[in-house]
Amino acid sequence: MNNNFKKFLLLWSGELISAIGGGLTSFGLGVYIFNKTGSAAGMALVTLLGFLPTVILSVPAGVLADRYDRRVMMMIGDGCSAIGIIYILLNMLRGGASLTCICIGVFVSASFSAILEPSYKATITDLLSKEEFSKASGLVALAGNARYLFSPIIAGFLLTVSNVELLLIIDICTFFLTVAGAAVVKKGTPTNATGESAPFMDSIRGGWKTITEKKGILTMVIVSSFITLFLGMFQILAEPFILSFSDAKTLGTAETVCALGMLGSALYLGMRGIKKNFIAILGISLLLAGVFMMGFGFRQNILMICFFGFLFFMSLPFANNCLEYLVRINIPGEAQGRAWGFIGLISQMGYVVAYGVSGVAADAIGLVTGKGVGAGASMVIEVAGVLLILISVGLLCTKSLKTLENA
């Protein structure tokens, strides 16, 4: 194992710990809000505000990642994002946090986290060779989704012996570990800072040109936005769907069992990677994900939910791996920050739409049918699965995308 891959593993470990801490907060706040309001829309609103800054700030954050030291940007983003969580914790310690307080805290935390993402993605390209990209993408997918793999069962257990305040405290502590990891990597890595003096808007336009001038890149990015749209619907509605007939402990266990599918895939990809046929693997994995999503929402049966949820999460790392690899090898290193900023902007729009409409849709369907929010969530998940299948079929039929594999 070369020295740069060891540095990547250090950064990756920090992000893994941070994701677990963030997952504890997300799970705890979701249960807290659902118990107070009984509405999927309230949970969706908080999640939306947690992603909106990422969308709004991703492009300027990408420019900053190309102009200034990416490790410093990561330290600022990770460290300062604790401010919003501390605000929520203080309000809870004073007697309880309102939905408004939670929304403010989540928005502030997400605003600083938005600085981190383009720098983190670009740093991976700085450290690794082309041959290591696929393996790294598998591990990155594992860390990014650790909030679904480890956090729910930990949070579900902790909520049976304590309260949501403990989850917030643990999350705050993880920020210091990730900042320390970035600081260690910074010491032994040459800075990427260019001291570029070009107007900020010119740099932004350069980032847009990077992802549009090569045929197929923008298509891949748009596909990723559809993935986040349907995944976002799944993420938002899985919790109220299960909570409608079960409790927080069962929810935590079910989410972890489902996410174990991702662990196996991510570990396989981290060791072996994908060598060829990226477009075919991408399309097939998305098609299967749509089928498994439909199975997940088919009925209120915890065993069936765990089975199809496991298969759903098992398919996701293959899709993410192919998308990241194809985009990464087709973008020049010096433009990685700006490019990932635009990629984040476009792809995260799927989450924004999902968080904005899925909770409201589930509540409305449950009200109209008279079967409650659980039935409404189930129906929206089913529809999302069908649409994901259609997207995957269209992707498999687009032969021009094959050129991206030959970069």
Image: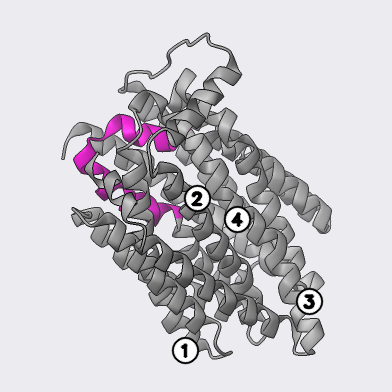
Residue depth check, mark 1 versus mark 3: number of the one nearer the observer: 3
Q: Is residue 395 above or below residue 188?
A: below
**Badge number at residue 364:** 3
Distance between the alpha carbons at the discs numbered 1 and 4 = 27 Å
Q: Amino acid at mark 3?
A: Ala
Say if the magenta span includes residue 120: yes
Q: Earlier in the sequence, mark 2 or mark 3?
A: 2
Q: Amino acid at mark 2?
A: Ile
Q: Quadrant of the N terminus?
A: top left
Which span is picked out in magenta?
119-144
Q: Residue at x 40, y 42 (%)?
A: 217
Q: Which residue is mark 1?
A: 303
Please tell me whether mark 2 sits on a helix, a strand or a loop.
helix
Residue depth check, mark 2 versus mark 1: number of the one nearer the observer: 2
Q: Which residue is mark 2?
A: 222
Say left or right for 313 vs 176: left
Mark 1, other Cα within 10 Å: few <14 / some 14–19 / many ≥20? few
Q: Quadrant of the C terminus?
A: top left
Quadrant of residue 263 within the rendered picture:
bottom left
Q: Is residue 55 above or below residue 162?
A: above
Q: Earlier in the sequence, mark 2 or mark 1?
A: 2
Quadrant of residue 332 within the rendered picture:
top left
Say left or right for 157 vs 127: right
Mark 3, other Cα within 10 Å: few <14 / some 14–19 / many ≥20? some
Please tell me whether mark 4 sits on a helix, a strand or a loop.
helix
